[in-house]
Amino acid sequence: MVRLGQQARTSSPFAPSVAKRSRSADGRAAKPNRREHFVRICALLCAWTVLLGGCVHTTRANFLRHYTLNAAASAPGTAREAPGTHGEILQLAQIVVPEWLDGTAMYYRLDYEAGGRLAAYANSDWVASPATLLEPLLQKAILAAGGWRAVIGPRSPANPDVILQIRLDDFSQSFSQPHASTGVLDATATLISNRDEHVIAQRHFHVEVRAPTPDAQGGATALNEASAQFAGELRQWVDSAAVDANAAESR
């Protein structure tokens, strides 16, 4: 109960006061003094600061993390001698992917569950599609091995002698247990002569690298290393296939 002449307290700075203003001797309502204005303004500012702080915290919690591929191609353990320069141009065709990989989503698979449920991380993704990220990495790796006059990308107007086609079938993080996962890269490469369109060679690649942590960052680290390993193995295979093809033509 509010006693006569005593102002009621409120729990929120936004709630209106339930107490009546005191009146002057002539019956008119007394105007609030400067101290009351100052207290109310301070209360409003404090409440607004708390509200903004909550919004900033929520925004940071939902901030999307972007990952990319930046590891150099790893050297295969059984690499052959790089072929001598033969003046041919190799073109890396646009990498073909299934529909679910044609985007920037970062996928993981729960293999310990029935059916191996495939899902995408909500707050993490790739800066570009896996195929787009792999193209310059593979091009740089093959060029570094030597033996080719040039290694061009899929959008180059140059006329190549040999075309390298790649189908990327899997690029995801696979969980065998809730706290154990690997980065999985599965692809098929086909080397084709652009002169008569015959298949020079074809090979399937499957690379798995253990993730250091069971989360998106661990999956990105594992897939980054898997991509580097794939680039190294692909470089060795392309150079070996070129050596064998040139040797067969010279007989």
Image: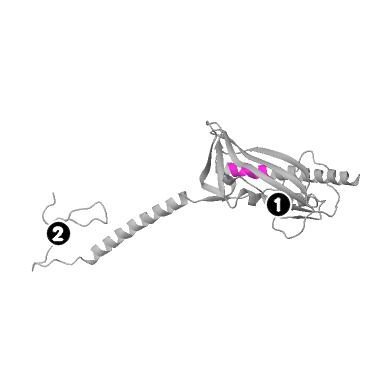
The crowd level at tag 1 (other Cα within 10 Å; few <14, some 14-19, many 20+) is some
Q: Nearer the viewer, residue 177 or 150?
A: 150
Residue type, label 1: Ala
Residue 156, located in which quarter of the rendered image?
A: bottom right
Q: Is residue 205 left or right of residue 27?
A: right
- The residue where tag 1 is placed is 93
Residue type, label 2: Lys
Q: Is residue 53 left or right of residue 131?
A: left
Residue 38's x, y, as percent? 27, 63
Closer mark to the observer between disc 2 and disc 1: 1
Q: Magenta: predominant secondary structure element?
A: helix
Residue 6, located in which quarter of the rendered image?
A: bottom left
Magenta highlight range: 219-227
| Residue 74 visible in the snapshot | no
How are the residues colored?
Answer: one colour
Upstream in the sequence, badge 2 or badge 1?
2
